[in-house]
Image (spheres, grey):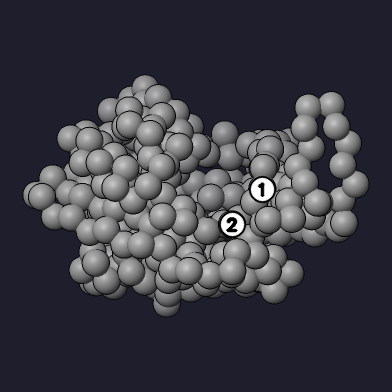
Amino acid sequence: MVVGSLHYDIMVDAPARPRKGETVAGASWSPKFGGKGGNQALAARGQGVPTAMVGAVGSDDFGAALLAGLDRGGVDRSAVATLPGVGSGMSVAIFDAEGDYGAVIVSGSNLAIRANQAHDELLRSAKVLILQNEIPEAINEDVARRARQFGVKTILNAAPARAFETALPGYVDILIVNAIEAEMLGSTPVRSLADAEGAAELLVSRFGAVVVTAGGDGLAFQDEAGGKVSLRSIPVKVQSTHGAGDMFVGTLAARLALGDDMLTALSVANQQAAKLVSTPESERGR
């Protein structure tokens, strides 16, 4: 079960990302289904695991496209609300010649999600819950608290990073952050796999288990029982890094729901993220 954001993404290809005050001539643009929540739901469903999405879209063309994207991916969207008078979430992502990108998101309807959309009957049926930081933290806390009561494992992808203002950390079973997010949550800078291992060790004091991803250097996992896993990244030719983190999170959650041990789940998630990174945007599902 995924509670989170849905964004209609507009992808722009350009030789470079513009600096302040600069106009850059792009080569092409295309629409894409997105939002961390939506992407993670599709990634989980892609592993063959029945997946439900809880979110909100506006009653506009973007919203209709997002609902169609969930349908194509086979995700249960019965708990996705369509809200009149509110614009759907959207983003613009500009990709440079190296495949890296910068993006601007407009949250829109994602800020109007209600906690009771994740009703107890639906939540009780889940094995794993995925949350992110693109919706209000109070919603995440409410759902995570009830998930704990039902014995559902909660994964928080704390992206984008922000200071916690509720008791949410106490209900999180696995925290997943990248290098920047780990540092913003209090770790030392992450510039290598060894740094990621140190960050996971530091952050695990606040969470039951932590995964720190370090891009091309790999990832590190540690839990409060002392379990540790470090994996180097899989060498690939980078086509686009967009969505790699969401593919990792959704795949990891799905593999855990299927009963994989942590090493296996992390390895499969690492492989799927690498596969996505090496696939051009034009060849990915829209």
Tell which residue pokes out farthest to the left in this image.
225
Locate the N terminus and report the quarter of the image it occupies: bottom left
Q: Position of residue 43 (x, y in %)?
A: 49, 66
> In percent of the image, x 27 and y 71: which residue is there?
264
| Quadrant of the image containing the C terminus | bottom right
Find numbered disc 1 in the image and state the secondary structure of the residue it sits on: strand
Whether pointer 2 and pointer 1 mark residues with C-beta atoms closer than 8 Å, the reply is: yes
Q: Residue 111 versus residue 210: which sits nearer the camera?
A: 210
The one nearer the camera, 163 or 127, is: 163
Secondary structure found at label 2:
loop
Q: Earlier in the sequence, mark 2 or mark 1?
A: 1
Q: Report the residue at 52% width, 58% height from top.
A: 244
**Left or right of 194, for residue 68:** right
Separation (CA) of disc 2 from disc 1: 8 Å
Residue underneath mark 1: 101
Name above or below for residue 157 compared with residue 247. Answer: above
Q: Pointer 2: what residue?
A: 241
Q: Which amino acid does the dot numbered 2 rest on? A: Thr
Q: How many marks do you count on the picture? A: 2
